[in-house]
Structure formats: C-alpha cells, structure tokens
Amino acid sequence: MVWRSVMISRPAKLRREHYSLAIDQEETAFVPFEDIAVIVLNHREITLTHPVLSACAEYGIGLYATGSNHQPAGVFLPFLPHSRTTRMMRKQLGIAKPAAKQAWASIVRRKIENQAACLKLCGTKGVDRLESYARRVRSGDPDNLEAQAAAFYFLQLYGSDFTRADERWTNAALDYGYSILRGAIARGLVAHGLHPTVGLFHDSEQNAFNLADDLIEPFRPLVDLHVAKHAALTEGELIPADKQALVALLNVDVGMPQGRMSALSAIEYAVESLVRVYEEDAKELDLPLLIGLQAHRLEC
C-alpha cells in the first residue's frame, strides 16, 4: 500500500536511482518509488529525466504539474496494463440507467451527509437542513438536491458574502485541494481498469475526467473542512506550506465500511466498489464518511 505524497516547491532535479526517486537540491533526498502515491511539481525550475516518468508509470504514481498560477494544471497517469480494460470500458458504456442513477444518488447522499458533518465539526448552524436534504435524495437526484445543498452549505461554512467566483485565499485553497483529490481518484480508476472519461452522471465531451468528477463528490468536504479551519488565519495567496497541507489531506483519516483509513486508501476501496457495481456484483458504493482532520497513523 502506498502512503507518501511528495511535493517539490524549490528548484530541483529529479532522477531515478535504482528503486528510488532521487531529488537533487542542496542535498540529495531519496524516496522509494513503491512508497509514493503522488508527486506534485510546484516550481518552474524543476527538471526530471525520462526514467523518472517511466518509474511513475511502472509504480502507478500520479505526477502533477502546476501552471503559472501554481494550481495543478495537469496530471500524468500511468497506462497500467490491465487484463480487463476493454471489458470494463464495455461495462461502463453499457451500465443500465437504473444502476447508474442509483449509484449517483448514493454519491450525492453521502456528499450532503459529509457537508452536514463538516458544518457540525465547525460548530456551524445548518446541520439539520443538510441532513434533511440527504434523506430526500432519490435515484438520479431528479430534484437536484446536490445543488440546493451546495448553495446553502457554502454560505453557512464561509459566510453570507462568499461566492466561488471570488479571487481569494479560500477559493484558491479549495481549487488546489480538489485538484489533488481529482488526480488521485483518476489514478485509482486507471489502476482498476476503468476509463476516467466515461462517467455515471458527468458526461461532458470536453472533460477527460468525468468519472473522477463523479466519485470526488463525497471527498470534497474533507477539503472544505480543512479550508474552513484555516481561512480565518490566512489571507493573500497560497504559500508552499498551504499547498503541502492540502496535499497531506490524502493521508487524513475517513470512515469507511471497512473501518477507519486514510483518504488515499478510501479512494482505492471506493473505486473497487464502483467496479463491483459495473460488474453487477453490488448495488451500493463504499463511500467515505467525514470524521475530522486527524492524520492516519500506521500501526506496527
């Protein structure tokens, strides 16, 4: 199981040395490839060798590059050889509408439940209203309760003057955190033979990550909670420490039917449950429950 997220925010050269990523800066640090889940390149003066890219593909590592605004602009995903890739593509394209609508309803329901949990953890009003929305979600969410809940939730969490269009620290942090989650989910989908383009609900022809944008929904409140806890203490642009903390959310514990685990592990279980839905071996998805911001601890 991979646990580590590597974020590089200073000039560096990345190269492969045997089974490790070598990071050449003032000194050289070595990180075993088998321990890495994601690498974030957050500086314009970072160079890397072709063997590093090959290793990322070989070990199933998601490699993020940031743009001029220092937000994740792209992700390199491994084209992992998978025995059922073509078969799963047919399953994705041929999923019965009732099954897809029920899966989407479970995603929306858990997302709203986690939004309610986020408000509760922040000591904010509105929990009962969100819990009511969650109970009323029907197959396919025909009443668009997801949007109704979101419109209410963000105002409760970040204040009555908040809009997602504003250029402010809060929105920059949300965008960064969501991008990291989205890439990690896309990586998990590819690793399990699924094609990120073919979604359950999202179906934009211009979006290469429709399925990732479906599955990310119940994970979003994890980012929301972190940002809410830090927004009042921070202003201006995101600094490297902010970004490091957002990447580290992949190692924060969430609740899953299998028990308490890191968000990164929860993504793997959620994707596995999605495969079972496509295979018609299950009707319900295993989705995360927001329980706080405690980092996962390895037990030895």
Image (cartoon, helix red, strand yellow):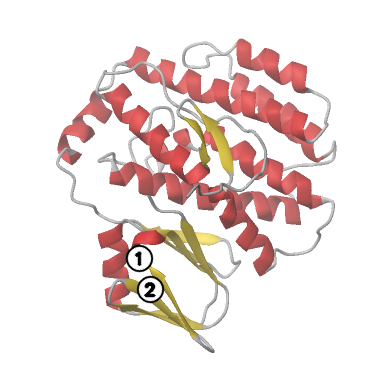
Task: Rate crowding at label 2 as few (under 14), some (14 to 19) or many (20 or more) other CA atoms within 10 Å.
Answer: many
Q: Is residue 16 left or right of residue 43?
A: left
Question: x, y percentage for residue 40?
Answer: 49, 65
Question: x, y percentage for residue 133?
Answer: 66, 16
The residue to which callout 1 is attached is: 33
Question: x, y percentage for residue 75?
Answer: 41, 59
Looking at the image, is 155 positioned above or below residue 300? above
> Which residue of the protein is positioned furthest toward the bottom in this rendering?
26
Q: On residue 21, which mark appears?
A: 2
Are circles 1 and 2 on residues that touch, CB within 8 Å? yes
Query: Element type at marker 2?
Result: strand
Toward which corner of the image does residue 253 lie, by quadrant? Answer: top right
Task: Rate crowding at label 1 as few (under 14), some (14 to 19) or many (20 or more) other CA atoms within 10 Å.
Answer: many
Toward which corner of the image does residue 276 lie, by quadrant? Answer: top left
User: Is residue 207 visible in this depiction of the protein?
Assistant: no
Looking at the image, is 152 positioned above or below residue 136? below
Toward which corner of the image does residue 53 lie, by quadrant? Answer: bottom left
> Which residue of the protein is positioned furthest toward the front in this rendering?
300
